[in-house]
Image: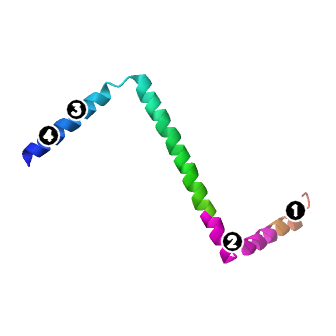
Amino acid sequence: MIASLDFRYNEAMQKVDEASHKSLKKILRDNFIGGIAWGLGVTVGVSIILAIGSFLIARIDYVPIIGSFIVDIVNFVQNNNPNL
């Protein structure tokens, strides 16, 4: 068990040592590509969630309720503000 932990420790330390010797160009390239992948993943994920949410809301017929609520707010503001 101790030999296994010692091996894992040495292996981890070797990876840390190798990572500390990366060139700045390689670090910047890897982080840039990782950032683009993360941004693309978030965009696709949010798009899918919004599409599913919109589909479900349309099927449940909450949109007309929300729409009439917004119309009531707009009418209230227009009636109480003569400058509009």
* Disc 1: which residue: 81
Q: Is residue 20 left or right of residue 68?
A: left
* Disc 3: which residue: 14
Amino acid type, callout 1: Asn
**Up-down relation of residue 35 to residue 78 (above or below):** above
Q: Is residue 36 left or right of residue 68?
A: left
Task: Say which residue appears at 55% left-offset and 54% top-offset.
Answer: 45
Amino acid type, callout 3: Gln
Across and down, in percent, residue 1 comes to 8, 49
CB atoms at circles 4 and 3 under 8 Å apart? no
Span colored in magenta: 52-73
User: Which numbered disc flags the more N-terminal residue, 1 or 3?
Assistant: 3
The image quadrant that residue 74 belongs to is: bottom right
Report the predominant secondary structure element of the magenta stretch. helix
The image quadrant that residue 48 belongs to is: bottom right
Q: Which mark is residue 7?
A: 4
